[in-house]
Amino acid sequence: MSFQSLKEIVTAAAEQKKPFFRIVLEDDMSERMVSEEESFTAMRHMYDTMGRADESYDGTMKSASGLVGNDGQKLEEALKAGKTISGSFMSEVMIRALKMGESNACMKRIVAAPTAGSCGVMPAVFLTYQKYFDVSDEKMTEAMFTAAGIGTVIAERAFIAGATGGCQAEIGSASAMAAGGLAYLMGGGEQEIVHASAMALKGLLGLVCDPVAGLVEVPCVKRNVIGAVNAVASADLAMAGITSRIPPDEVIDAMRTIGMALPCSLKETGEGGLAATPTGLKVMEELARPEEERGTPGYRKSDRNRDLRGK
């Protein structure tokens, strides 16, 4: 991508009198030497794949470790029973975030946005918005380009991998991307887009990557929920005219500085944070044993392979 900052995209949009998403789209066309139709079709395919992944969720599956699974279905049942208080829209955002994270842990097809560990944030926000506000697939694809522009700048200025910047780089980046895209869908201009993304990222600065037993399951799946809810809140703030006191690009730079300061034990090594708690260590020890010797076998690899063959 030829842009190294969100400010550059905003400036280009103002000078060329084009929306944020089109600046990103045309940059993709130039970089990959493809037509507008080819670029748009590729992005549309990614959004469609998110939708299919959401539809294919299987509430009966658990991950090979047995650590995650069924929670998306549980929350959906709670919503239907009137047991949630966050409203149907936000509840569905949380449900979709859980489902996508669980699908990833169960080795089902997802879209890394920007990573597999944070795959539930964007689809949770975008798919739910489209359902409630009956937005065209074309408009949703434009929001995808908006989010992609934000994510690419974050990757250029900082990082999007937990191994280099902690979970703030994964869930934080995904939340920023979803917030910016949602602000666009809500009718926001360039300022609302970048400030929504900045506020979303600010809210998750310092979030560490501490996967229990080194698996992208606990606490990763539930953190997708936090990232998605944070994105919706940040878009609402931006659309109300609230801005980030720290400029968006400086927020990204701060994330990089924080990530570099984090010890390796808090960057996807499974050696610190929740992974190093007594329960986390016990889980790791249990999973290191042969399946037939485990106290709680959960969903075994043999079971998952059998189910996959039957689908």
Image: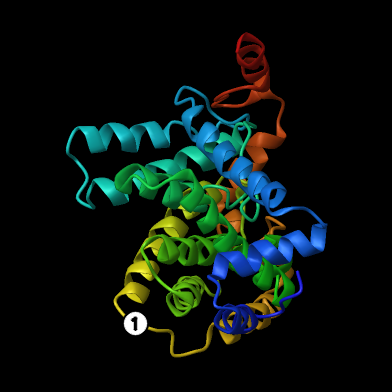
Quarter of the view holding residue 71 = top left
Q: Nearer the viewer, residue 153 or 230?
A: 153
Asked if one can make out residue 160 in the rendered structure from this viewpoint, the answer is no
Which colouring convention does the figure follow? rainbow
Task: State the quadrant of the C terminus.
Answer: top right
Disc 1 secondary structure class: loop
- Above or below: residue 154 compared with residue 32: below
Q: Position of residue 15 (x, y in %)?
A: 59, 84
Asked if one can make out residue 129 in the rendered structure from this viewpoint, the answer is yes
Q: Is residue 43 left or right of residue 183?
A: right
Q: Nearer the viewer, residue 180 or 270?
A: 180
Q: Residues within 10 Å of mark 1 (few under 14, many from 20)?
A: some
Quarter of the view holding residue 95 = top left
Q: Nearer the viewer, residue 223 or 40?
A: 40
Q: Nearer the viewer, residue 297 or 193?
A: 193
Q: Position of residue 84 (x, y in %)?
A: 22, 45
- Please name the residue that numbered disc 1 is placed on: 242
Residue lying farthest to the top in this orientation: 310
- Above or below: residue 81 compared with residue 273: above
Q: How many marks?
A: 1
Q: Position of residue 181 (x, y in %)?
A: 48, 62
Residue that appears at 72% across and 66% down: 27
Q: Position of residue 114 (x, y in %)?
A: 64, 56
- Above or below: residue 221 compared with residue 106: below
Q: Amino acid at mark 1?
A: Ile
Residue that appears at 51% across and 72% down: 201
Quarter of the view holding residue 111 = top right
